[in-house]
Amino acid sequence: MVRCVDSITMTLNADQLILQALREDISSEDVSTNAVMPHAQLGEVELICKQDGVIAGMGVFARTFTLLDPSCEVRALCADGDRVCAGQKLAVLRGDIRVLLSGERVALNYLQRMSGIASYTRKIADLLEGTGTVLLDTRKTTPNCRIFEKYAVRVGGGRNHRYNLSDGVMLKDNHIGAAGGIAQAVQAARAYAPFVRKIEVEVESLAQVQEAIDAGADIIMLDNMSPDQMREAVRLIDGRAQTECSGNVSAENIESIAGIGVDFVSSGALTHSAPILDLSMKNLHPVTEESE
């Protein structure tokens, strides 16, 4: 089980993004809610799972409501990383009904998206289990949602590749073209980047694999190669660099890669193609002293 986003990370990084999402959804007021609920009224509502999957983002879900009203209470009945099933009650929320209604869509958007990514990641990670190959995500994330989506990948059993462009050196085809070749690109990166940074080079042919080896690359990414080409590349590299394969990797073709012997496999599909996990808030009702 993976613990939820910690409070420091939430405050420093997530709060402002959640608030932006709430401002997008409530530009001035929630007209529908204010029309039917003009005054504060304590209420409860349940969070229900509508399909099987892996839950991720319970802390973000709860935070959406407490940013609107700190007195809102979210009693979680599951934790990030738990496998959940259709019909399962995941949480009970108590607070001002106006807050529960106004925060519902934004909170569910985050939770459904993050849980969908965690569920899809778990599906692929399970297919790689026992192979020794580590599943990675990419930077192909929804703008302004990277912190949430990369966290969801970890919950699902994957690991994060570099978080952003400041996080590591990856020399792709256009970097290599700009520098004049693999050797020149690696040499320039060695001279510029801090010595603690590894240098990864993207290659598309066995000839480029040899160039990357000769240049002293730390990691060699095998981009859009066939399984046979990847096997030959791993043999050629022979442990002199770590290996990563990438390029249209999905649940449908991951088994053709498993067992080849690469150290890492990166998949943009984890974040750009994962379907949401269907969740819903149901059974909203007022709470009075008589009903408790």
Image (cartoon, rainbow, N blue to C red):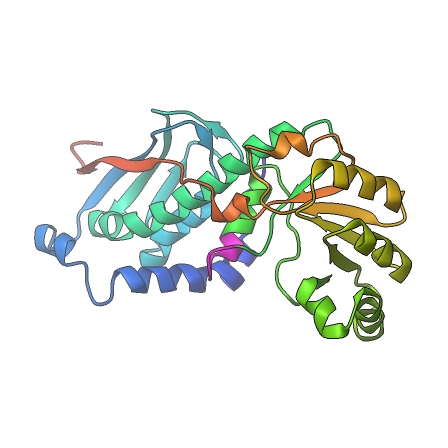
Q: Does residue 139 show up magenta in the picture?
A: no
In which quadrant of the rendered view does residue 156 lie?
A: top right
Give percent across and percent down for residue 248.
Answer: 58, 44
Helix, strand or loop: magenta stretch:
loop
- Rendered view: 274 above or below 131: below
How many badges with numbers are in the image?
A: 0
Q: In this view, does 9 lie to the left or right of 42?
A: right
Q: Which of 1 and 138 is in front in this view?
A: 138
At x 40% / y 36%, what residue is drawn? 277
Q: Is residue 163 left or right of residue 111?
A: right
Give percent across and percent down for residue 27.
Answer: 24, 66
- Rendered view: 101 above or below 93: below
Q: Mark yes or no: residue 262 visible.
A: no
Q: In the picture, which quadrant includes the N terminus?
A: top right
Q: Does residue 145 show up magenta in the picture?
A: yes
In which quadrant of the rendered view does residue 46 lie?
A: top left
At x 78% / y 35%, what residue is drawn? 261
Residue interval drawn in magenta: 141-148
Give percent across and percent down for residue 259.
Answer: 74, 30
Q: In the picture, which quadrant includes the C terminus?
A: top left
In which quadrant of the rendered view does residue 127 lie?
A: top right
- Rendered view: 238 above or below 161: above
Q: Mark yes or no: residue 272 visible.
A: yes
Give percent across and percent down for residue 273.
Answer: 47, 44
- Rendered view: 16 above or below 50: below
